[in-house]
Image (tube, coloured by chain):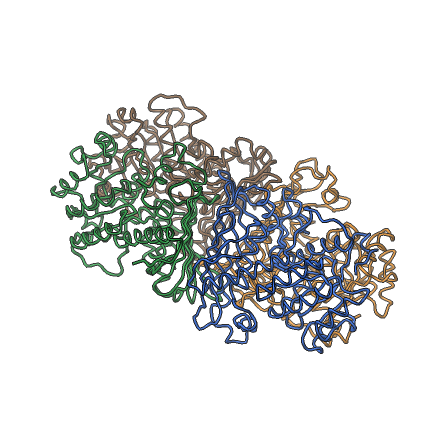
Chain colours: A orange, B brown, C green, D blue
Amino acid sequence: MIDAKKSEQSDITLHYGMVGGGEGSFIGDVHRKAAAFDGKCRLVAGCFSRTYSKTLATGEKLDISKERLYENYQQMAQMESEREDGIDFVSIVAQNYIHYDVAKAFLQAGIHVVCEKPLCFEIEQAKELKQLAEDNNLLFMVTYSYSGYPMVEEARHIVQSGQIGEIRTIMGEYPQDWLTNLEEETDNQQAQWRTDPKIAGISNCLGDIGSHIENTVHYITGLNIKRVCAKLECIPPKRPLDTNAQVLVEFENGASGMYWSSQIAVGHENGLRVRIYGTKGSIEWSQETPNALKVCAIGEPVQIYSRSQGYIGHKAQQLTRLPAGHPEAYYEAFANIYVKFAQVLVKTLHNQELSHEDLKFTDVTDGLNGVLFIHKCVESSKKGSIWVNVE
Amino acid sequence: MIDAKKSEQSDITLHYGMVGGGEGSFIGDVHRKAAAFDGKCRLVAGCFSRTYSKTLATGEKLDISKERLYENYQQMAQMESEREDGIDFVSIVAQNYIHYDVAKAFLQAGIHVVCEKPLCFEIEQAKELKQLAEDNNLLFMVTYSYSGYPMVEEARHIVQSGQIGEIRTIMGEYPQDWLTNLEEETDNQQAQWRTDPKIAGISNCLGDIGSHIENTVHYITGLNIKRVCAKLECIPPKRPLDTNAQVLVEFENGASGMYWSSQIAVGHENGLRVRIYGTKGSIEWSQETPNALKVCAIGEPVQIYSRSQGYIGHKAQQLTRLPAGHPEAYYEAFANIYVKFAQVLVKTLHNQELSHEDLKFTDVTDGLNGVLFIHKCVESSKKGSIWVNVE
Amino acid sequence: MIDAKKSEQSDITLHYGMVGGGEGSFIGDVHRKAAAFDGKCRLVAGCFSRTYSKTLATGEKLDISKERLYENYQQMAQMESEREDGIDFVSIVAQNYIHYDVAKAFLQAGIHVVCEKPLCFEIEQAKELKQLAEDNNLLFMVTYSYSGYPMVEEARHIVQSGQIGEIRTIMGEYPQDWLTNLEEETDNQQAQWRTDPKIAGISNCLGDIGSHIENTVHYITGLNIKRVCAKLECIPPKRPLDTNAQVLVEFENGASGMYWSSQIAVGHENGLRVRIYGTKGSIEWSQETPNALKVCAIGEPVQIYSRSQGYIGHKAQQLTRLPAGHPEAYYEAFANIYVKFAQVLVKTLHNQELSHEDLKFTDVTDGLNGVLFIHKCVESSKKGSIWVNVE
Amino acid sequence: MIDAKKSEQSDITLHYGMVGGGEGSFIGDVHRKAAAFDGKCRLVAGCFSRTYSKTLATGEKLDISKERLYENYQQMAQMESEREDGIDFVSIVAQNYIHYDVAKAFLQAGIHVVCEKPLCFEIEQAKELKQLAEDNNLLFMVTYSYSGYPMVEEARHIVQSGQIGEIRTIMGEYPQDWLTNLEEETDNQQAQWRTDPKIAGISNCLGDIGSHIENTVHYITGLNIKRVCAKLECIPPKRPLDTNAQVLVEFENGASGMYWSSQIAVGHENGLRVRIYGTKGSIEWSQETPNALKVCAIGEPVQIYSRSQGYIGHKAQQLTRLPAGHPEAYYEAFANIYVKFAQVLVKTLHNQELSHEDLKFTDVTDGLNGVLFIHKCVESSKKGSIWVNVE
């Protein structure tokens, strides 16, 4: 539980536990670095692997007391909830297929949750988790990492303040090229599980990266998707899951969108890019040059907004540490999603009122939207790329 | 007819006439500058306007002998075909709705044709013109200006030589922002006729600029479109014709594509861009930075090809005049489509064999493809953005 | 002489002659294309070569009446000055070493002059030509081609309007790489004469391209150079003339500058770039992306100005033909220097008053400044790269 | 001292202390984040301020045992050297003027040193520290942070492997704009001390950022500077120290260089950029887009190398954590200088042989070079910007 003395010094340390993220896990290490980055969150408990000896090994390296290294996540949820100094929240970074079970266990134990995306595999599961969190007044962050970039926050500020007017059309893309060849036939483990329906679920490319377009656009604009027309392609055809996905989108306000995600687009590394066009202006942001934001107004010179400059809004300023020109990047963005979560969690633990000044983290509703988006796109594609309503 | 003496000196001057392009015509002036650029084509006859006095005035400024300034295009076609020194070809730059009639008249008079895009309004008309040109052994260029850029030629060379492998997916876009507001309610004549179905035909945005994506991709790859799923939007809704068009494309070889054209995309001026992804590599070209071509191979550093450098292929080299680093741009590209046409026309006039070494100009078949593309996209959109076969 | 009737129609045709620019001349063809571009200047006389038969051959190709093809420039100056329909001006595009003699002959014959840079070799010659032009009320343009770019004109407008405040420091560079290897030992004629002191004069790299930095900065800012400290390097050392030149500059207002020109900077094609920093803002322009201008104000987002947009100043607007997004480039810039010259010449021929609204062309004073700059830098370098006053 | 058991697991934890870096110190926090980033270095002792109570407060926040929070650095050096579990090294992040005294104290106590740049103020001091480190076999890193960027490491690999041939000329620049106005007259503390000779030393701009050009170029090329001709300007003149510095450089191999650093260059944030030209190729790197490296070979397309790609060399690969396309930036570069230091320190503590495969950190010799560069440039400028030998 939160250390009151430290909070008085406004240097809160939140204590958290982790499920998954053992040796060889890329994303587990990213979460730990991110949570530790600003000294606000301390890892004190864990169940890093299904194999207890591995959990012990990882825990030792991370200087975690042995009594808080658990044989399974159920045990961890129960025991931590019973401790007086139990964890303030859990971070779930285990493989996708088990997100639902783990999140449910911790929610039922009354523990706040941070969970990697995708939230879970099935729409009904997502709705259940959402209900459970609400019923128990528990915070539930789904870690859409790109929402942590300061210039995404600034884009949100610009769009939602009305600066570019009513949204008319949106272009989103996320091309990569790492599955151009059949990497899963080499010893590339990431390629193996991403292309394996048993572990990755009903979609590979759209689920893994297309859903980041969906979330980033939603985070910036607040717009909900009304219907989709999607074409998911397994390239080459022998692959069981999609590696290229093209989606026509229609939003509730009538705006249109085009989303493209790909893992076979040679020359692209991690090219998430969103372009949002309104009646008065537009914004463009690219993940690979994250410190800049292109802002246009009709009839005016293109403007390049830069992170940390004085004209940047208050919320984005909270998510930056270095002076302008000293670039911040992926790790800092990831740290920022923990900054956002910690800010709200501390207020919650102290029974303080939240305000619209508080930073917004991507929550279980975003997670549900992601699951819906993936399911509806897969349904559209399977039916011959016809239009399918989203809810 | 071609001046034999000059041709012996390999400094051929072709003589041509023009229909349309009178005072205030933007594109007429562009064609004249382009044809004159390299000193190969001389304007010697014209019917620049439906009003004879205007034709006379334009003709005088252009130093054209009065006897070759005509009251109407029918008269011009007949009389030029009867002269011993009659024009070698006609350039049709009149308004879109009359392209068909004028082109037909000159073909029937046995005169080679250069015609602005769109070739005509109806599919049947396009097929008829194509048949007429073939039956009379006449050259027929449809002026897709962007095919004149040297780096588009180089892209064609790279793709068709197999350097990037089998094409898998293609992204094309052409955003502009000049119709963001209701410009047609001001005195902007271009805006007035572009948004007027009587003059512009069944589509504005897709027809005007979307068709450039279609042609540029076809020019580079040689791929034919099998079917489309298109969403054309009239933004704002009170407009009678589309200003935003999003199209899913399927090619005959199974490759997929996404095409976006827009006139309401704030911040974009003339953003034609094509990205073509194959099994081994990719290329990317943008009209606004036309002297560069991004070329990628899987696992290799991105390469930036530059116009006029020694490693550029023979065909693109023929379309460039200045050393690398001295940029060439729109006018020079337009001049190049006349270079291509003139090269083939001179050979034809001298009964020389054509070879695959000759430059390829965009011809009546390209024009027909454009008309088909527009019609099928409009049909798809009207039916609720469903898939429609192209032929 | 100017055709009054046409001038009434505001479609002036100026008639001009050319000295130099025969077969194989690159710059002669550029001048002819540029002068012809907008239909304002017609080539009617010439002495294209020291060999009369070559002049005749070139003249025939260019459709020039044989009686106006001359055996030598002296004859041409005399006879054209005596004709009632004699040329309005002469364009001198012969090799550098003869600029002085030819210009002097035409000035003495009372004919306006356009002359390629460098104006001449010696400072005294330059002063003499300047005096001669002034004494005879003759226009004298020295063709610094980059001053013809619309965004250079816009930069001039921005800087001279005070928008960026008082100038503090200036960075200019012009790197190329075409002399990285000993090209003069191949059959590269350009390389041969550029590196030959007899033809190129006392400097190769600084004289050819460094002087473009000098002029472009002066054109934009109006600042005069007070002193220089230059290091000219012959790389590799066996070369008799410089291929790399680095210059510290001090301006009369106290501002500092750094100029770098190079022909051995691998990876650069024609990289003229100027960056000008004032107390309130800055501008940056690069010749290889000439349609954009970076404009900064302290504490504000970077702005990208784009050619032909509505916010561009009146003078730059006069130098552009195409809508924004349709790039213009080197040929169009070159045409613009003739547009500027023609605008003033027509007024002069009609005894009309010039105003500060008229476009400014780079004149014989600019040419003199160029010769001074080259001489003083060479002097500085020879003395061990010490500071040398410029006048 | 190093924990042997952990080292056997190849998860070494080095223990370190810090001098300076108390509340409000920007660079202290950066060092702590950097050292902690990869879990290799743990902060266990400190003297963060001249005021003991402040040291205690900072220490408590950082969870440092009170017995290892010291009243002054002399005490800290002595007591830590006497402890069996004393620190493995000290990080000196106090103000510039005290670097020499602190470093000397720890060296004399036999403790390895990490010291912020500049190493010290006087040349003789620098030489003394160098001698002291050598005599005591102690490691001494001077933290030139930009040497930690993976693409700087790759540039070093490319240049030193001979890929671009013999170096001919080098362009380095580091423009900023934060001192455009008189910020020191506001409450900007950084501006106050940077422009105060008592704290900043004999130079502000050149010393602070110009020295980063000097070091980055040296790190990449290994070239030593032979002489300089520098012009340091106090802009506006009322400032006691330079805010704009332009330097002509000559290297021992005969290559030339131009270095520009500025704090009044409106529109620039932190624009460190180096361009290095050789007989066969060139490289260019910019700090604001640190994940890319432009690599050119004569006659070949420009190549863009990207961090983490398979073609990147072994040493740069050791300095990157994320897949290509997931940007890393300033904090990660800073962490890398600790990675380099830790790698060598661990080997040293274990008496292992170093090899040329080991990463190179910027050491006391680099620090000395920096002091020399600053002094010689100031001397040159004071003497009227004449050439001055560097040693």
Whether B360 is drawn above or below D271: the answer is above
Q: Nearer the viewer, residue C84 or B339?
A: C84
- Relative to C71, is D24 on the left or the right? right
The percent coordinates of residue B79 (x first, y second) are 25, 30
Tally of numbered tags: 0
Whether A222 is drawn above or below C177: the answer is below
Q: Nearer the viewer, residue D190 or A74?
A: D190
**Occupied quadrant, residue A108:** bottom right
- Relative to A186, is D270 on the left or the right? left
Q: Nearer the viewer, residue D6 or A113?
A: D6
The quadrant of the image that shows the N terminus of chain D is: bottom right
The percent coordinates of residue A331 (x first, y second) are 67, 57
Whether residue A166 is visible, yes or no, is no
Whether residue B226 is visible, yes or no, is yes
Q: Nearer the viewer, residue C21 or B170?
A: C21
The percent coordinates of residue B274 (x first, y second) are 51, 42
**Occupied quadrant, residue A352:** bottom right
The percent coordinates of residue D315 (x first, y second) are 66, 47
- Relative to B312, is B253 on the left or the right? right
Whether D162 is drawn above or below B243: the answer is above
